[in-house]
Image: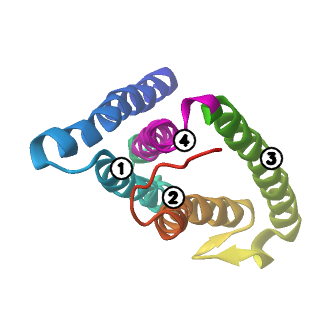
Amino acid sequence: EGKMLVFVLYLIVTIVSIFGGYLPKLFVEKKGMEPYAGRMRAMLIFAFFPLLALFAQPLQGYSIWFPAIIIGLAGAGHQAWSANLLSTIGDMFPKSTIATITGIGGMAGGVGSFLINKGAGNLFTYAEGQGAAFTFLGFEGKPASYMIVFCICAVAYLLAWTIMKTLVPKYKPIIVE
């Protein structure tokens, strides 16, 4: 059953993320939106997918399939978000700067990943040491720390979308002289 759970999880990610790359095109061609507006709308839709992760841990008691499906949908939202985010670089920046901007973004993602993994590891170790004294949203010990991480991941995309929309409210190509 474990192999089937992983297969279904990745199948969801694959299918939904392919659609995620197509969704902005639908907004542009069918709704007549500007490409940036279409991408931002798609990114907003996919920013809500990780909120489903808040239900993965509480629903595990009913069936192990719930977390697998939920995490698959959250992962698909992440993948679709990433595809659209990387495409905005090509839309906004001159061709001569795309590799540099993408590299800077990749580096920031790597540093962020390191910090999140280090922080989560410290949190898990601390929670495990505290046992039942460490609680969060009805969970105790290490499960409470997992719920904290799920909560952070769940809201991160909406926060990132808000920051991006605040910094770039309307499409405007960046000119490098």
> What whole-number distance in Å separates the C-alpha atoms at marks 1 and 3?
27 Å
Image: 95 above or below 148: above
> What whole-number distance in Å separates the C-alpha atoms at marks 2 and 3?
17 Å
Mark found first going from the N terminus, 1 or 3: 1
Q: Nearer the viewer, mark 2 or mark 1?
A: 1
Which residue reaches farthest front?
A: 177
Mark found first going from the N terminus, 2 or 1: 1
Residue at the spot of label 3: 111
Badge 4 density bin: few <14, some 14–19, many ≥20, Cα 10 Å: some
Q: Amino acid at mark 1?
A: Tyr
Asked whether residue 94 is drawn in magenta, I would say yes
Residue at the spot of label 4: 93
Mark found first going from the N terminus, 4 or 1: 1
Image: 12 above or below 92: above
Residue at the spot of label 2: 157
Quarter occupied by residue 169? bottom left
Which residue reaches farthest left?
A: 30
Residue at the spot of label 1: 36
Q: Nearer the viewer, mark 2 or mark 4?
A: 4
